[in-house]
Amino acid sequence: MTASTLNGTRILIVEDNFVVADALRFMLTGYGGIVTAIVPNRELALAALATDPVEVAILDINLNGTSVVPLAEELRARAVPFVFLTGYGDEAVLPEHLRASPRFDKPVEVELLVRCLLEVTRRS
């Protein structure tokens, strides 16, 4: 671990593969993050946000064949920063207006992800 710590940053993980999501939770809590919820779809993400606000979200682009884009747009409207995490290397899976958002390929290098989470939360 380096000096990059999340210092209690509240994080929502939207990932349909529980093994991947739980590994992320483990890594992020090791860096001082607080994972408020792990959810597999947009509906549960919105419910989680209604009960427990977050500072940043990590979004799998493809949730069991359903695009996460509507959730990303909802988070944008709420001014909640997010990063994409995907098993698809092609940025064409995202609409043009979201392609500038941070995107990481699975498996993710946790130190890079932590730095990015810190950066996007500072900007908001």
Image: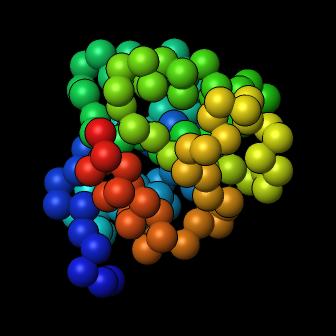
The percent position of residue 67, horizontal first and vertical second, equals 71, 27
Q: Residue furthest left?
A: 7
The residue at 28%/74% (across/down) is 4
Residue found at x 39% / y 64%: 114
Left or right: where 90 falls relative to 76: right
Q: Is residue 119 visible?
A: yes
Q: Quadrant of residue 71?
A: top right
Where residue 107 appears, as percent x and y from the top left, is 65, 66
Q: Is residue 121 above or below residue 40?
A: below
93 left or right of 54? right
Q: How is the image coloured?
A: rainbow
- Relative to 120, say whether 78 is above or below: above
Can residue 44 be seen by looking at this rendering?
no
Q: How many marks?
A: 0
The quadrant in which residue 89 appears is: bottom right
Q: Residue at x 43, y 60 (%)?
A: 116
Location of residue 73 (image quadrant): top right
Residue 77 in percent (x, y) is at: 42, 18
In this orientation, which residue lies closer to the viewer: 59 or 35? 59
Residue found at the far bottom of this picture: 2
What quarter of the picture does the N terminus occupy? bottom left
Task: Give the camera-side residue of 85 and 79.
Answer: 79
Q: Look at the picture and state if 24 lies above or below 53.
A: below
Left or right of 108 on screen, residue 63: right
Q: Give how far across and how far down residue 60 sits, in percent.
A: 61, 42
Quadrant where the C terminus sits is: top left
